[in-house]
Image: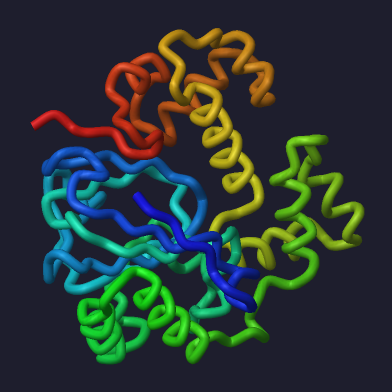
Amino acid sequence: MNRFLPSAPLSSCIECYCFYDGGTLAPAGQERCLPNAQAAIIINLGHDTMRVGDRQRSGAWQAFHGGVLHGAFSQFSCIDTSTMVSTISVCFKPGGMRAFLPLPAGELANQVVELSMLWGSDTADLREQLLSATNRAAMVEILERFLLARASWEQVPPAAVMFALDAFQSRRKQRSITEITDQLGLRPRRFISLFEDSVGLTPKVYCRVRRFQHALHLTENASHVRWTELVLDCGYFDQSHFIHDFQAFAGLTPQAYLTQRGPHRNHIPLPE
C-alpha cells in the first residue's frame, strides 16, 4: 500500500489517498473488513466491478461497477479481494465526506453505494482519466480536481461537531459526551443530530468504534497480549465489556482475531 497526502483545502477533510496493487492485501479470496467509523471512496482500477458481501442475505454478494462510496461503518463487512487487485481510495477524516454529499452522512451509515449514484456518468469519465494517467502523482492530481469541483464547503461539519471530534480523538484526557454537550451549551438531542448528520454515526457509537480501533492498535505486531492491561488502557469497564464490544464490531473474539488476522489490522482473511 502506498499513501499520498492531500493538498489544501482538501486536506481539511481527507486523511490520505491509498493505492493498493496486486497482493498488498491478502491473496485473492475473501476478507472481513473491520469498522473504523470513517467514510471512503474506492475506485477499482484493475477490474470493472468489485464484489461486497450483502449483509441482508448471508453468503450473497453485491457487484458494483467502477467505484463505490462506503459510509461510516460500525459493523464488519466482507469483500472479494480477487475483484480488487488494483484500487485507489480516498480516505476521509471523520466528518470529511459531508462536504461532498447531497444528503446527511447518517443516511449512508453501514452502506455501500455505487459512485454513479452520486455523480452520474462523471464517475466513468473520472475512472477513464485515472486509467490513462502515467503515474500515481498524476492520478492524485486528477482525483483532486474532480473532488474540488464537487465540494460544497458550506456543508462541512459545524464548529460544535469539529470540537467534539477533536475531544473524542484526544488520548490526553477522555471526555464524556455529557461533558462535551455541557461545554457546548447544546441539548443532547440536538448535538446527536448534528454529529450524526456530519459523521454518519451517533457520538456514542463513534466513540465505541474509536475505542475498538485503539484496542486493535495496541495488539498490532504483538504475539502475546496482556488483556487486563489493554482493557484498562482502552477504558473498558472490565474484560467482559471488552469482549462484548470486540465481538460486536469484529464478529470474532479477541483471541480468534489474533489467530486469524492478516498483515493489515482491519483486514481478516476468510477461510475458503
Q: Is residue 189 above or below residue 64?
A: above
Residue 75: x and y in percent read: 40, 44
Residue 22 appears in the rendering: yes
Please give the name of the residue rendered at 52% of the width and 65% of the height, measured from the top-left corner. Answer: 106
In the foreground, 53 or 262? 262
In the foreground, 192 or 215? 215
Quarter residue 267 falls in: top left
Residue 43 in the figure: left or right of residue 84: right
Q: Is residue 58 above or below residue 90?
A: above
Residue 3: x and y in percent read: 44, 56
Q: Quadrant of the C terminus?
A: top left
Please give the name of the residue rendered at 41% of the width and 12% of the height, measured from the top-left corner. Answer: 223
Residue 197 appears in the rendering: no
In the foreground, 154 or 184? 154
Please give the name of the residue rendered at 28% of the width and 39% of the height, measured from the top-left corner. Answer: 32
Residue 210 in the figure: left or right of residue 172: left
